[in-house]
Amino acid sequence: HLTCPKLACEPLSNPHLNCTKKDRLPQEAQRTWLRIVALGVSLALVTFLLWSSAGIDDDVAEVVAHRGEVLEGRFIEVPCSEDYDGHRRFEGCTPRKCGRGVTDIVITREEAEQIRRIAEKGLSLGGSDGGASILDLHSGALSVGKHFVNLYRYFGDKIQTIFSEEDFQLYRDIRQKVQLTIAEAFGIRASLLYLTKPTFFSRINSTEAQTAHDEYWHAHVDKVTYGSFDYTSLLYLSDYLEDFGGGRFVFMEEGSNKTVEPRAGRVSFFTSGSENLHRVEKVLWGTRYAITIAFTCNPDHGIEDPVLT
Ligand SMILES: *[C@@H]1O[C@H](CO)[C@@H](O)[C@H](O)[C@H]1NC(C)=O
Ligand SMILES: *[C@@H]1O[C@H](CO)[C@@H](O)[C@H](O)[C@H]1NC(C)=O
């Protein structure tokens, strides 16, 4: 670049010197300088903000779904793990697109309350000595003390005095809605998904664990625990901080965990492989109700909807 010598631009020193074009250069250089300084300051500011927020993330996970939010649908794609390679692949169903989603508009809060009453009825017949009880309407398994009983075998025909056909119809409707939601989010056909076991209600309170069955809080991968799982979903039936404290769901990731705060009617769903390592925080007070609804792509691992017989 040519620079205009300062003296040469003084009109008085040489009025004939045509320096009009050249004498803009120092002004332009000044503006360039200002821009560089402004850029430097902004960069420093951004760096500081990123640094300070990263510092906060060290101990506070990012909340992807707050209890007070009503999410139409939030979907986060994550790369699939290799867990699916160890199993038979079902094209058009076995995850090629992996990730996690949350929606509050698929199941209404009224439906959540109705289905919670089914859970309450069933679980009131038993309950673990520890803090975590389950009721599986498919197999009939119910936590009692330190074990499980089969509700259907135990009650026989009398089961119809406990649950109604409407209860079971609601359960099936909800399963169907969740199945459609998962299929849409992952771009697969809902008819290729099969309900699989275990699919169950859970009731958790703050009582200390008595057996390994009560230890729900360990980080785990669903597909490692239950080989048949391809897609896992959770329907929450109570509200975080209204009905219970602790008990939030956490996707564990290097650098920053991602938390889903339970809310009645909230459906959280995700591919079941290691890309979605997760845990549930210990419940600190109150009672937390949820349903785990699992799907497989392998028809051999499919189970039927429960029916009242
Ligand atoms: C938690 O539930 C169990 C039954 O599963 C019950 O025995 C216990 O009293 C409950 N604990 C609290 C703190 O409510
Ligand atoms: C994620 O959660 C785990 C288990 O609660 C914890 O040990 C880890 O420090 C958390 N990571 C971050 C980045 O917060």
Image (tube, rainbow, N blue to C red):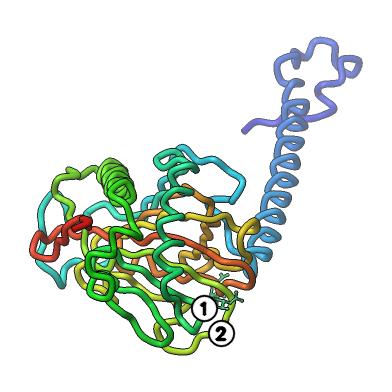
Q: Residues within 10 Å of mark 2 (few under 14, many from 20)?
A: some
x then y, percent, for residue 276: 37, 64
N-terminal label among 1 and 2: 1
Q: Is residue 182 visible?
A: no
- Residue 208's tag is 2
x then y, percent, for residue 280: 49, 70
x then y, percent, for residue 97: 26, 52
Q: Is mark 1 within 8 Å of ligand 1?
A: yes
The residue tagged with tag 2: helix, strand or loop?
loop
Q: Quadrant of residue 241?
A: bottom right
Q: Quadrant of residue 145?
A: bottom left
Q: Amino acid at mark 1?
A: Gly
* Residue drawn at 17 percent across, 43 percent down: 189
Above-or-below relation of 64 to 218: above
In-front residue for pair 261/169: 169
* Residue drawn at 41 percent across, 42 percent down: 107
Cα separation between marks 1 and 2: 6 Å
Disc 1 designates what residue? Answer: 131
